[in-house]
Image (cartoon, rainbow, N blue to C red):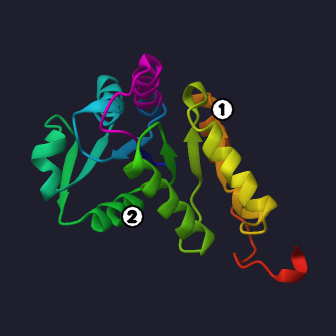
């Protein structure tokens, strides 16, 4: 993997471990010569992951919509900052630039980005690994919800298994490097239930 996109909050959250792990993820990517692609801001967990990578001389590409430039405060120390016109263009550009995706803790925006990438993968629009760094069990209830989707016949096992999960950075990166995308279509036949 040459570059990984990281989706995460523009806030730090209430648990210091989120920031600590964001910085560590950035450092780990840089040490493994994996470029970071992220939302381009210098605030919250977004700024922390970028600063972590930059502290180890990593390559960091930010993708920021013009209308968020003043709200999220563009990071001025990046390798490259790409300004785009919309949130959709931001996600498309981040997808184009990466070989895989990791979600850290975040809010609605982080979930929306994560699920759009999962949806694109489910539809066969890309075959990249998509992962959650489940810091301090942050995503436990979301992971449980995906299991309920399978139990209720709304999601195939093979599609639920596309979401790689670990609470350990090295383990998560290893899962991503060894990822094999599903070879079946997304649609569930009633006969399969």
Q: Which residue is mark 2?
A: 96
Q: Position of residue 76 (x, y in %)?
A: 13, 37
Q: Position of residue 61 (x, y in %)?
A: 28, 47
Identify the disc placed on residue 149.
none
Question: Relative to 124, does residue 139 appear above or below in the rendering?
Answer: above
Dot placed on the residue nearer the N-terminal end, 2 or 1: 2
Residue at the image position 30 percent from the left and 41 percent from the top = 60
Q: Secondary structure at mark 2?
A: helix
Please name whichever residue, 69 or 95, is drawn nearer the observer in this view of the structure. 69
Label 2 environment density (alpha carbons within 10 Å; few <14, some 14–19, many ≥20): few
Residue at the image position 36 percent from the left and 66 percent from the top = 92
Q: Which residues are magenta?
A: 8-28
Please name whichever residue, 5 or 99, is drawn nearer the observer in this view of the structure. 5
Q: Which residue is mark 1?
A: 171
Q: Is residue 90 left or right of residue 114?
A: left
Quadrant in the picture for residue 27 = top left
Does the image show residue 179?
no
Magenta stretch, main secondary structure class: helix
């Amino acid at each position: 993997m040459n570059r990984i996109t990281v989706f995460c909050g523009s806030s730090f959250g209430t648990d210091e471990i989120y920031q600590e792990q964001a910085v560590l993820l950035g450092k780990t990517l840089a040490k493994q010569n994996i470029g970071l692609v992220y939302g381009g801001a210098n605030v919250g967990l977004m700024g922390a992951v970028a600063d972590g990578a930059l502290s180890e001389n990593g390559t960091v590409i930010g993708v920021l919509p013009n209308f968020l430039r003043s709200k999220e405060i563009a990071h001025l120390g990046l390798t490259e900052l790409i300004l785009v016109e919309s949130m959709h263009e931001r996600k498309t550009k981040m997808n184009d630039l990466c070989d895989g995706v990791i979600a850290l803790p975040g809010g609605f925006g982080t979930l929306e980005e994560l699920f759009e990438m999962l949806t694109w993968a489910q539809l066969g629009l890309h075959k990249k690994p998509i992962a959650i760094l489940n810091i301090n069990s942050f995503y436990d209830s979301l992971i449980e919800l995906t299991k309920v989707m399978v139990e209720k016949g709304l999601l195939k096992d093979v599609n639920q298994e596309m979401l790689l999960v670990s609470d350990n950075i090295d383990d998560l990166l290893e899962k991503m490097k060894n990822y094999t995308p599903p070879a079946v279509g997304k649609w569930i036949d009633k006969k399969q239930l």
